[in-house]
Image: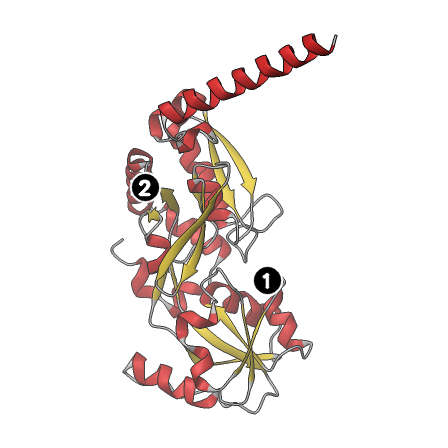
């Protein structure tokens, strides 16, 4: 009995050794052995469904089944003749859910720190075009203007600046006011304080752990004197809490938002850009923007002209 058991164990070890030798001969397994590669347009048409990665944020993805980007991608799905599927994600996970790569921003660069399953075909949730993101994904045609503002409680001892003709001078004025004051930001988003060198102003920087929609209520409730907000969220906050917050001024030049695509899906991105072009031409895009952000045309009329 003992001899038979030893023979069985020896045989098993020999099989494991043979398997390891075979794997080492074949070389490392490709990334798609863990997760299938990103899908391009032909794959989506064949599957009959497009997966929209979204993070509930402002009026782009409300969390109630609608929003500017939700309706926009639903219309794009109908344009392609496929079914629409919403896949909720987070700011930390969204790029990995699109690309299969977990990335960490490092100033204007990125570090790939792991892999994860691919869960969607495009990102659309008021996704700001940032240099570090462009190293790992491609953007479609910009669809919304934005900018980073410093917003404070109405009773905070910081006066709003008087805007001039030079945005860089305006930014310098705002930064000159922040020393010694508390300010909130959010990591892995366009509200990451290090993107704007906020710490160098002498401000007391804190990273907010809630979602972006909770930043304005946080300063109203006294968690901080000021916060970074981008234009879409600030416009909603000013309407929702009139007289309780004020805009101090800009912390960035003009930016833009757009849908994000895998670099391995150029045909899907091209189809989306053509869809946006047609929507601008027939006026349906402007009508959709007016539905969710009527005030944006008052602040940034030039963005929507001749587009």
Task: Please tell me how crowded label 2 is: few (under 14), some (14-19), or many (20+) other residues with Cα within 10 Å.
Answer: some
Q: Taking 158 as reference, is 68 above or below it? A: above
Secondary structure of the residue carrying tag 1 is: helix
- 209 or 146: nearer the eye? 209
Q: Residue at x 30, y 42 (%)?
A: 273
**Side (left or right) of 167 relative to 215:** left
Residue 217 vertical placement versus 261 (above, below)? below
Q: Position of residue 293 (x, y in %)?
A: 48, 59
Mark with earlier residue (1, 2) = 1
- Residue placed furthest toward the left: 306
Q: Position of residue 306 (x, y in %)?
A: 24, 55
SS for tag 2?
loop
Tell whether label 2 touches label 1 (CB within 8 Å).
no
Residue at label 1?
213
Does residue 264 appear anywhere in the picture? yes
Give the labeled residue for mark 2: 263
Residue at the spot 44% in from the left edge and 71% down from the top edge: 194
The circle on residue 273 is: none
* Of residues 8 and 271, the one drawn nearer to the viewer in this rendering: 8
From the image, which quarter does the N terminus lie in? top right
Q: How many marks?
A: 2
């Amino acid at each position: 009995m003992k001899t038979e058991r030893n023979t069985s164990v020896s045989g098993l070890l020999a099989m494991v050794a043979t398997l390891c030798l075979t794997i080492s001969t074949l070389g490392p397994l490709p990334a798609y052995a863990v997760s299938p590669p990103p899908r391009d347009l032909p794959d989506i048409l064949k599957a009959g469904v497009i997966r929209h990665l979204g993070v509930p944020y402002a009026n782009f993805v409300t969390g109630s089944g609608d929003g500017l980007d939700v309706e926009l991608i639903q219309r794009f799905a109908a344009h392609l003749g496929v079914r629409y599927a919403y896949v909720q994600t987070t700011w930390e996970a969204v790029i990995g859910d699109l690309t299969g790569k977990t990335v960490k921003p490092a100033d204007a660069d990125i570090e790939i720190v792991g892999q994860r399953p691919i869960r969607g075909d495009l990102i659309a949730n008021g996704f700001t075009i940032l240099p570090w993101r462009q190293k790992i994904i491609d953007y479609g045609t910009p669809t919304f203007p934005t900018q980073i503002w410093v917003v404070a409680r109405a009773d905070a001892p910081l006066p709003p600046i008087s805007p001039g003709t030079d945005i860089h001078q305006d930014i310098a004025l705002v930064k000159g006011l922040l020393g010694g004051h508390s300010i909130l930001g959010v990591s892995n988003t366009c509200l990451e304080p290090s993107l704007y060198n906020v710490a160098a102003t002498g401000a007391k920087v804190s990273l907010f752990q809630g979602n972006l929609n909770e930043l304005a209520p946080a300063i109203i409730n006294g968690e901080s004197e000021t916060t970074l907000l981008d234009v879409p969220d600030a416009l909603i906050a000013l309407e929702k809490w009139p007289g309780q917050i004020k805009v101090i001024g800009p912390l960035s030049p003009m930016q833009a938002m757009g849908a994000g695509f895998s670099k391995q899906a150029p045909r899907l991105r091209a189809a989306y850009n053509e869809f946006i072009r047609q929507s601008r031409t027939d006026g349906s895009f402007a009508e959709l923007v007016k539905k969710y952000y009527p005030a944006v045309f008052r602040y940034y009329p030039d963005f929507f002209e001749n587009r």
